[in-house]
Image (cartoon, helix red, strand yellow):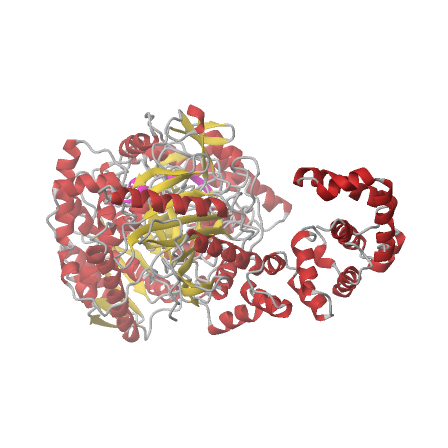
Amino acid sequence: MTPSTPSPNASVLPEGWGMVIGLEVHCELATATKLFCCCPNHFGDQPNANTCPTCLGLPGSLPMLNEQAVELAMRLGRALNCDVKRSVFSRKNYFYPDQPKDYQVTQYDLPTNLGGHLDLPSGPRIGITRAHIEEDTGKLNHVGGGGRIHDAEHSLVDYNRSGVPLVEIVSEADMRSSEQAKEYANELRAILLATGVSDAKMEEGSMRVDANVSVHHLGEPWGTRCEIKNLNSVRSLGRAIDHEALRQIDLLTNGETVRQETRHWDEASGRTGTLRVKEDADDYRYFPEPDLVPLEPSAADIARIDAALPVLPGARRAALAEAAGVPATAGGVVMAVERGLDHLARAAIGGGADAGRVLTHVEHNLAVDGAETLSPERFGDLVKMETGGELTATQAKTVLAEMVATGGAPAEIAQARGFEALDSSALEGIIDGLIAAHGEEWEQFRSGDDKARGKLSGFFMGKVMQASSGQADGKAATALLRRKAGL
Amino acid sequence: MSALEIAAAVRGGERTARAVMEEHLSLIGAREAELHAFNLVTSEQALAAADAVDARVAAGDDPGPLAGVPIALKDNLCTTGIPTTCSSKILAGWKPPYDATVVERLTAAGAISVGKTNLDEFAMGSSTENSAFGPSKNPHDITKVPGGSSGGSAVAVAAGFAPLALGSDTGGSIRQPAALCGVVGVKPTYGRVSRYGLVAFASSLDQIGPFATTVADAAALYEVIAGHDPRDSTSIPEALPPVLPRLGDGVAGLRVGLVTELCQAEGIAPDVAARVAAAAEALSEAGAKVEEVSVPAVIYGLSAYYLIAPAEASSNLARYDGVRYGLRVDAPTTAEMYDRTRTAGFGPEVLRRIMLGTYALSAGYYDAYYGKAQKVRTLIIRDFQAAYERFDVLISPTAPTTAFALGAKADPLAMYLNDICTIPSNLAGHPAMSVPFGSGDDGLPVGVQIMANALDEVTMFQVAATLEGAMA
Amino acid sequence: MASLSREEVVHVATLARLELTDEQIDTFTPQLAAILANAADVEALDLDDVPATSHPYPLTNVWRPDVVRHAGVRDAVLAAAPAAQDGMFRVPSVLGDAP
């Protein structure tokens, strides 16, 4: 497995500089219960409502591993082309009030998933170092001092999130631009959703991305990296990486050095700030968790997981792109797969509907609940009516919405609504009549400046729609007006 | 009366559980101030529970195999709403919101807790002198220690406060005090008894087990508490063969190995060695084939144990930080609150072991200490496996000497040497028990340790019953 | 390696979140050194080819079904906590983020 080297695409950087990015992504697994106890894995309840002796770290409590969490973690591992191996839970020891046992149960030297890869839609293959299982921490709420940690008078701890199952997916430092990092995050999210491993909501924290960023003169060894935290959206991820790379270059060009540290992204100011300098004192004293036993998936377990894996987003995009004759990176293709509408789109295209119109509808008009229930035949029929001139684009959109809501056939809906696009001779008749009736305005439209023309175009289009009872195709009418004006 | 006799009488309606309980509470009232077996005696709850057992008997319901039997619980076993302190200031007054699995099983079997027994703080020690609430005293001579860490439970049984008690054994904490107090003490196979609700000291070594005055009582208690529990991931799923029906099967033809390295270990007193030799002789007379056997790696047991146990303890005891329960010493910041709470809450031996364990796991030392100790554990397991290919059980002294004077072992290392014969069984995981076998030159009890292959408690109990019979 | 320095003891205390007095450090340093010296026999063994044992009884793949059960201990635990407020555990100000 030799990942192809991603091409440097660090356009935001000054000439001669490159950046190197690796991502660590934490995802909450979509289980009913926590990793080691039977408390609900549920966001948004009353503080500490979902707690028990185990996730509060009470003396004498013991962890009981959630079978479904293991299943989902292994499923993700296989989706990321990892080796799923014998694994062992370890304790990571450190004191912090959101950590009820003052150690975190995680996987250290023997993680469940090792050595995979993820192919970006734009081509590069990004190595996956590992994807291991671990428990989440509780949450600190800072009281006083405006809720900021350093000024708070005291803090309140809620352990509802304590023990929620996570996978941490660690990439190789294979990315060379913020664009690639964003692509990676989006693609990983698509895989998490497709496999049902996580709901992967960055805004709600069920998918959390930390970025390791370093810069270097192209052709020279990589520089010291900084880790950036608090990235709440894919957009923040991109902004933070670019900002951080430029900050490091600034330091280096001014003869200073980059310290290895953890930095915090502040979305409002668009800057990163020091959170924590890595110290020699960081010593987590990992050792095998004696309260849990090793996991040893059999070859049959792995075969069963592989057999049950859905077709993954990359393969689905490729299939749709091929059917539509467009690149796999086309917006409609990406969205169709993201929304699970690629089967619908492929079936409609396969049935003879125009691929461009199909993808346009998917991209712009089908971001609604129930879109996946559309009949591919009827969707194809609608597109054919539109390209055949029986419906205007606006009418097609209206009919499509009703098809999603009612499941009806496009011809019947169009008929019931009285949608019959005007044929071009009727449209020409209406426009000729309007030119005759509004000579002064017509003259201004023909010879006026852009501003006047825009205003009068609106005037004439309103009249066209009025005269045609809204059945004229706006695009066709505009084109005809301009042609008659010699524009 | 033995536990089995009490249960039979209560089940048969010949005695009420209340009368039994009142009798034991009055014994406790007479001698507890002198012996300090308990951190807490729960008389009211005990009498109420006794009445409930009597009501079941009156109603014709099955009151359970240990109906009405008083039992003392080591104060590191969680009991709902009843303080569970581990004899530590850091947990003083803490009331668990749940019962340990063993406590649930005892309740279901009709046994009744009389209270929570004293221990070395967090079960770290061999004399009960490390209790934050003062030491327990040996009922045979109150100037002597009862052993530890389950000293209070051993005292409770030896003094007749309860015919049964539960302890926990991480490096000998049931067997050594049993030997020093002249009672039976059992450490089952690691994983036989659920650890759910046992406040952890060293998770890969801790095991709950019975104290009793007779081998049969110990077996009866073992049968109640042992067996698979899904709440403990290290719980053994294999079926539990009953012990009691086979207890009288004898030892004819059994191969008994006398472990050379443990019989000749540092500090084994001649009077103790003589009793072990006498036990070998008794088994031989009962038809067993007794031979010496070498288990070479056990000489590393003490070193490995004092790296592994503190390492696990340093992590298990991190949670006592003043945030959620127990002691808090206030401070301006959480970090300072941690420091002050933990330093004020833990006694010197606990602090020492936390320090030792933290060091053994720390960067740069893990491989030399903790990592090596885990490999030594493998060697010890291998050597025992080789011995069990040739022998059904192994025997040795339980403790090097009879009970020593309070305050006699101020040096930590000297105290640790007390566990030299018991520690290898915790590292190997196999079952081991101590059975009283006469007394030393000072007239104080001597215990003989019987070890058996993993899961073979039945044979171990048979040998113990034979030795018990030889003393009768 | 058996010679344990005072500085190492101080460092270990920091890791273990303990605030030892000078007197305690003076007591613990030789005691811990002696215990480690006693363990030197283990340190000296050549165990390169010996696997480590972390569980005395070898089990694998122990897990439970993913089914919710409510523990109902929240109120009792909060009531007994050293400090609680608004259904949460109250702690003094926390300086610095989690690692």
Most extreme residue toward the left is: C3
Magenta range is: B113-125
Residue B439 visible in the current orientation: yes
Quadrant housing residue B96: top left
Residue A143 part of the magenta-drawn span: no
B285 or B453: nearer the viewer = B453
How many numbered badges does the structure rendering display?
0
**In the image, is residue A21 above or below residue B257?**
above
Residue B124 in the magenta stretch? The answer is: yes
Residue B114, given in percent of the width and then of the height, sits at 43, 39
Query: x%, y% of residue A175?
Result: 39, 57
Q: Quick check: B309 left or right of B43?
A: left
Q: Is residue A177 left or right of residue C2?
A: right
- A75 sits to left or right of C42: right
Examine the image and state in which quarter residue A292 appears. Answer: bottom left
Image x and y of residue A231, in percent: 45, 44
Instruction: Say which residue appears at 33% left-offset and 70% top-offset.
Output: B251
Quick check: B259 left or right of B108? left
Say whether residue B242 is visible. Answer: no
Percent of width and height locating residue A433: 87, 46
Q: Which quadrant of the rendered structure holds the N terminus of chain A?
A: bottom left
Q: Give the camera-side residue of A450 and C45.
A: A450
